[in-house]
Image: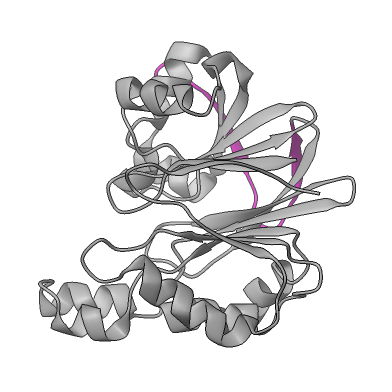
Amino acid sequence: MRIASLGSGSKGNGTFVEGTGGVVLVDLGFGIKETLRRMATRSISPWDIKAILITHEHGDHIHGAAQFARKFHLPLYMTTGTFDLKRFEGGLDVRRITLEEPFTVAGMEIHPVTVPHDAKEPCQYVFSEGESRVGVLTDIGHITPHVANAYHACDALVLECNYDPEMLARGPYPRALKARVSGPLGHLSNEQAAGLLESVDLKRLKHIVVSHISEKNNQPALAEAALRQVLHSWEGSLHHATQQNGLDWIPIG
């Protein structure tokens, strides 16, 4: 397995997970032209992609998904709640999934995990193939015991570090938006992300990808410093998926 990112942040998201049977794209928040430009930097063709998995209906995660899926004849996987809210129609192959019921794409078993976020029926995903396991976890307001258990044993973890509490408090967002971001259905702070790492199997975890960093309410150095507080003698690799450049391929296992 291996993973890469087209870009991560409030202006657009897309994460690649590749198994022996091909590539799966988690979310697509960029238009077709920009998606193809970014894909070229990862040496990947639309024909390598077997499916697009949607986590929830917010624009930075679905902006280009329907158009891209229609153009390249790709199935879209999403929960019924997400489908009902957005009504993906018009010649699209939409496959509705049930939370906590694994399904298989490109040779990988994919587990849609229930997460707390201000969307209709959001989920995040854990991918398994052979002995390798990859977790993708962004857009979540707080870490529940269920989420901690679902992501406990991963070889690689794409992890949201959305905001620094002090920067958010001082920042330009209106009070209501600050409350939404930091609320139980919003996004993870650097410290909340670090809290999850205290509960996972760090001996197994080899790669952490810092993701979905707010350009106005966080800095990569602050996110990394918060995570390092709990990683101590951890021997794995810490990566950053940025809004501008995403992240190049990382082999897993």
| Between 147 and 200, the one nearer to me in the picture | 200
| The magenta stretch spans residue 93 | yes
Q: Is residue 144 visible?
A: no
User: Which residue reaches farthest right?
Assistant: 130
Residue at image location 74% in from the left, 48% down from the top: 252
| Between 218 and 10, the one nearer to me in the picture | 218
Residue at image location 57% in from the left, 56% down from the top: 124
Q: Position of residue 51 (x, y in %)?
A: 60, 28
Relative horizontal placement of residue 244, taking residue 235 as reference (left or right)? left
In this rendering, is residue 212 above or below 55? below
| Between 234 and 22, the one nearer to me in the picture | 234
In this rendering, is residue 136 above or below 116? above
Count of marks overlaid on the render? 0
Q: Is residue 212 visible?
A: yes
Q: Quadrant of residue 126?
A: bottom right
Query: What quarter of the picture does the N terminus occupy?
Result: top right
In this rendering, is residue 192 above or below 67? below
Relative horizontal placement of residue 201, taking residue 5 as reference (left or right)? right
In this rendering, is residue 205 above or below 132? below
Q: Which residues are magenta?
A: 90-105
| Between 79 and 195, the one nearer to me in the picture | 195
Relative horizontal placement of residue 29, taking residue 24 as reference (left or right)? left
Q: Position of residue 70 (x, y in %)?
A: 44, 16
Q: Quadrant of residue 24?
A: top right
The scheme the figure's colours follow is: one colour
Q: Position of residue 92 (x, y in %)?
A: 48, 20
| The magenta stretch spans residue 120 | no
Q: Position of residue 236 (x, y in %)?
A: 70, 66
